Image: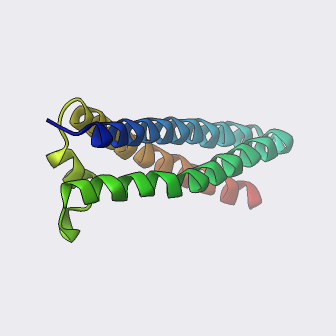
Amino acid sequence: METPEIEVMLAKLCEAFDQEAERQETLLAAVRAQTGAALARDINLLEDRTAAVSMLLRETVGAEAGRLALVRAVVAHYGLPTGDQTLSGLIAVAPEPWRGRMAEFQQRMKTVLAETRTAVGQNQAILRQAAK
């Protein structure tokens, strides 16, 4: 049985993870909107979408410190050795329902980051072609 303190930390951490996944999914949508604007050669829309991407990236950086502080607190609670201080390490030791929520976050992030990487690459190719 977990202590009330760790339950609160795990709840806050999972909420921070959910917010980050949503932010990254919104970022992916904005990057995809950049693609549409670039293909349409709509400079104003492209600038608007680029501003949205920049804002989301600033939000991501701003939220990171709080999330990392929660991760450090949970890692310290479980006494994870240096090599296991990863999300996978936390998933391995966390009780349900936190384990499932963290595993879902991990999968969401893997998917959205891979899709974002692809979309950014497509945007670069489109913009290079347009510059020619």
Q: Position of residue 77 (x, y in %)?
A: 24, 54
Q: Nearer the viewer, residue 65 or 114?
A: 65
Give the side of residue 74 with respect to residue 124, left or right.
left
Q: Position of residue 67 (x, y in %)?
A: 46, 51
The number of callouts visible is 0
Give the side of residue 129 with respect to residue 16, left or right.
right
Quarter of the image for the C terminus: give it.
bottom right
Q: Which residue is at the far bottom?
A: 82
Q: Nearer the viewer, residue 45 or 71?
A: 71
Give the side of residue 43 with respect to residue 58, left or right.
right
Residue 126 visible in this rendered orientation of the protein: no
Q: Position of residue 125 (x, y in %)?
A: 60, 56
Q: Which residue is at the far right?
A: 44
Q: Which residue is at the far top?
A: 97
Quarter of the image for the N terminus: give it.
top left
Q: Nearer the viewer, residue 109 or 95?
A: 95
Residue drawn 19% across the image and 38% down it: 2
Give the side of residue 13 with respect to residue 95, left or right.
right
Residue drawn 62% across the image and 52% down it: 57
Q: Is residue 39 above or below residue 54?
A: above
Q: Is residue 24 above or below residue 83?
A: above
Q: Nearer the viewer, residue 27 or 84?
A: 84
Residue drawn 70% across the image and 40% down it: 39
The colour mode here is: rainbow
